[in-house]
Image (spheres, rainbow, N blue to C red):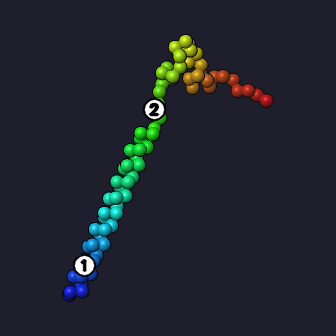
Amino acid sequence: MVKAEGEEKKEKKKFRKLIVEEEMEIVRIVEEKKKEEKDLIEIKTIKEIVSRRFYKYLKMFEKKNSEKIPIRKL
């Protein structure tokens, strides 16, 4: 019985060590994700990027209208 209790304590200690290692890994992953969020490029609308004088040409670059442009044939 004494050995069984000793082995049980060893298993509990091993289990606690695994839990601590898993928690440390989770913390590391969360910190990496936070860094990635900071590194993301801010997406801007076309009107924020393009000068006002070119607004009249914006429709030309919309997907629907650009699909109407004939494909070059060889």
Question: Dot 1 lies on which element?
Answer: helix
The answer to which quarter of the image holds residue 10 is bottom left
Residue 8 is tagged as 1
Question: Dot 2 lies on which element?
Answer: loop
Compared with residue 59, is residue 14 higher up or lower down, i.e. above or below? below
Say how many tags the image has.
Answer: 2
Mark toward the start of the polypeptide (1 vs 2): 1
Compared with residue 28, is residue 49 higher up or lower down, i.e. above or below? above
Is residue 55 found left or right of 15 in the rendered image? right
Real-space Cα distance between discs 1 and 2?
54 Å
Image location of residue 13, percent across then percent down: 27, 72
Is residue 18 found left or right of 35 in the rendered image? left
Is residue 25 found left or right of 62 in the rendered image? left
Q: Which of 20 and 58 is in front in this view?
A: 20
Is residue 5 found left or right of 41 in the rendered image? left
Q: Which of 11 and 64 is in front in this view?
A: 11
The answer to which quarter of the image holds residue 69 is top right
Taking the spot 47% from the left edge, 27% from the top edge, the residue there is 44
Compared with residue 53, is residue 3 higher up or lower down, i.e. above or below? below
Taking the spot 37% from the left edge, 58% from the top edge, the residue there is 25
Residue type, mark 1 in image: Glu
Q: Which of 59 and 73 is in front in this view?
A: 59
For the residue carrying disc 2, how many other residues have a C-alpha within 10 Å: few (<14), some (14-19), or many (20+)?
few
Image location of residue 46, percent across then percent down: 51, 23
Where the C terminus falls, by quadrant? top right
Taking the spot 53% from the left edge, 16% from the top edge, the residue there is 51
Judging by the rendered image, the residue that carries numbered circle 2 is 42
Image marks 1 and 2: residues in contact by CB distance under 8 Å: no
Taking the spot 40% from the left edge, 47% from the top edge, the residue there is 33
Image location of residue 28, percent across then percent down: 38, 54
Residue type, mark 2 in image: Glu
